[in-house]
Image: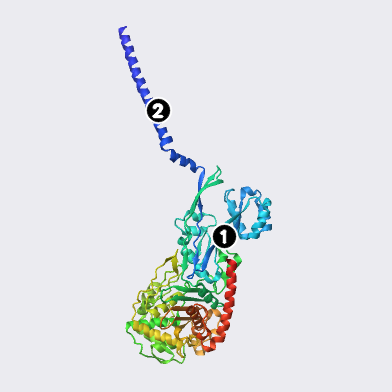
Amino acid sequence: MKHKTKDQGHSQGKLTRRTAVMGGLQLAFVGALGLRMRHLQVDQADQFRLLAEENRINIRLIAPTRGELFDRNGKVLARNVQSYRLIIVREDAGDVDQVVANLSKLVRLDPGELEQAMVEMRRSPPFLPITLADRVTWEDLSRVAVNAPALPGITPEVGLTRVYPHGPDLAHVVGYVGPVSDYDLEKIEDPEPVLRIPRFHIGKVGLEAKEEDLLRGKAGAKRVEVNATGRVMRELDRQEGQEGADIQLTIDAELQAYTQARLKGESASAVVIDCETGDLRAIVSSPSFDPNLFVQGISVADYSRLRDDKYRPLANKSVQGVYPPGSTFKMVTALAALEAGAVSAADTVWCPGHMEISGRRFHCWKRGGHGHMDMLNSLKQSCDVYYYDVAIKVGIDRIAEVARKLGIGVRHDIPMSAVARGLAADKAWKQETYGQSWQIGDTANASIGQGYILASPLQLAVMSARIATGRKVTPRLVKSVDGVEQPNLSSEPLGLNENHLRQVRKGMFAVANDRRGTGYRSRIIEETMRMAGKSGTSQVRNITKAERAAGVISNADLPWERRDHALYVAYAPADNPKYAVAVVVEHGGGGSSAAAPIVRDVMLQALYDGTPPLEAYPTGDRDRIQAQQEELQRDQDEREISQSDRA
């Protein structure tokens, strides 16, 4: 009996200990749970409140205001203007087709824009606004407001649209903007979220595209309250973005407009560069196009017209086009020969009208020949045989080296689309490109700017400026960004012997001012503004032996596309160079007849900073020049009216 009592007491003790342990564990669990709840509800309250807020508050991007573009004198080249657009919210409209039909009776709807809007509407939530019509007039907006009851879901909105007041005059320089496309996004490795805003505009070509990062700015943001379906209920606050930078160009809009008008009717290009600073004062490709057509999406008819034009208005010939430079390259050959010590300026070469090289006859443009030629006269009369001879003495590698020093075969760093490198070919290039050895006949061709040598009008203008100054004049297109002046890199010496440069300059002066010079008819009369230049004519077809025997067919008797290119380069004043100009007229025939008069007229316009007096022109040209000036003034007046309408 005593044994049972002892066992019972032992069992009760064990039960009490278990109860205490279990109770302790339960108490610890409850305590830990309480501490965790306190941590979540008190210590981390702000974090979880924020997570809860994100369930009902969205962050929406605000598109930044794009920076504007100005010329060197402060004239607006690209601006943002307020525009009205009509948007539709599908869930508010009800019968969308009927609402659109009613709207089309009041406002002209572009079929392309309407089709795009319908596509966006089908793939977007019903509460998102979709643009039906952009850049509508105030009168259209008024009609919509009066008829609002019949147009449920239609709302007017104010936005910004890019406008180019100077239209075609600066299309190739400035370029244009357009809506972001899938293709644009594919080209960007990590596109910013702002680029996904519907119909957000970015630069497509030209400076608008090259300086996109500067011009775009930074997006802002706004907090909006949305309901469970994602519909915006109200705006809580906003943080405005950073506007894009304003960019001032080196271009003179008036000189640009004059040059564009002067090239009217030609497939041509012209570049004007400041010899002191490298500033590009005008850079023109003709014909041009209206960039305003592209901002909202160009029509098929307009684009087809531009694409199919044989004069290629969409191509930027001034920097993208590369041409055999013809006789404008002879200064390069002459300098290379002088630098190498292969010839002196006084050495002469006999020109009978041709030269036999490796069993092949290389002809001079003057069939009967020029007789004895020294360097000055070879430039003045553009004798080909002289340059065949000296080029063989100096060799192509030295010629190519000097060409690159003068800016040919170099891609100049300016913010424009498709800036060409050109080609200053040498032995290594031909071996690498074609797997062939360089031939002596290749050197002869290259010496007069034919064969493998290619240059853009920009490069020819740079070449002329470098010869004129003896410095490494570097082209500059951007003058300042948000008022901060951009660096000028044109002070470095070229590294060529100044006496050799002087000999070449004498020849260029004779071209434009000596009665036997190829550019004499397009000279400048004003003593303080005399021009030094060089004409060039580059072949685009082979002339057969049979044709030479029968007589070379004149350019006037050939189809346009088989005529020679006409080139002329110059700088002025000859004794204190201020500007250099290069002009290429595609299939224009002779450089002295087609390109030289344009260079002279553009040069005078630049030197006088406006319309020059008739006394600056040769007497025989003054009546024609006066009529030309009057016609160009009428064109200018029409452009100003057009610019006013765009503004």
Relative vertical location of residue 330 with respect to residue 213 in this rendering, above or below: below
Which amino acid type corresponds to the residue marked 2 in the rendered image? Val
The answer to whether residue 150 is left or right of residue 290 is right
Tell me where residue 475 appears, x and y as whole percent: 42, 72
Inspect this view and state whether residue 456 appears: no
Relative vertical location of residue 522 with respect to residue 56 in this rendering, above or below: below
Neighbor class of circle 1 (other Cα within 10 Å; few <14, some 14-19, many 20+) is: few
Disc 2 to disc 1, C-alpha distance = 65 Å
Tell me where residue 288 appears, x and y as whole percent: 54, 72
Neighbor class of circle 2 (other Cα within 10 Å; few <14, some 14-19, many 20+) is: few
Label at residue 30: 2
The answer to whether residue 387 is left or right of residue 106 is left
Residue at the spot of label 1:
82
Relative vertical location of residue 536 with respect to residue 166 in this rendering, above or below: below
**Quadrant location of the C terminus in the rendered image:** bottom right
Question: For residue 141, what is the image quadrant?
Answer: bottom right
Tell me where residue 263 appears, x and y as whole percent: 54, 77
Question: For residue 447, what is the image quadrant?
Answer: bottom left
The answer to whether residue 637 is left or right of residue 435 is right
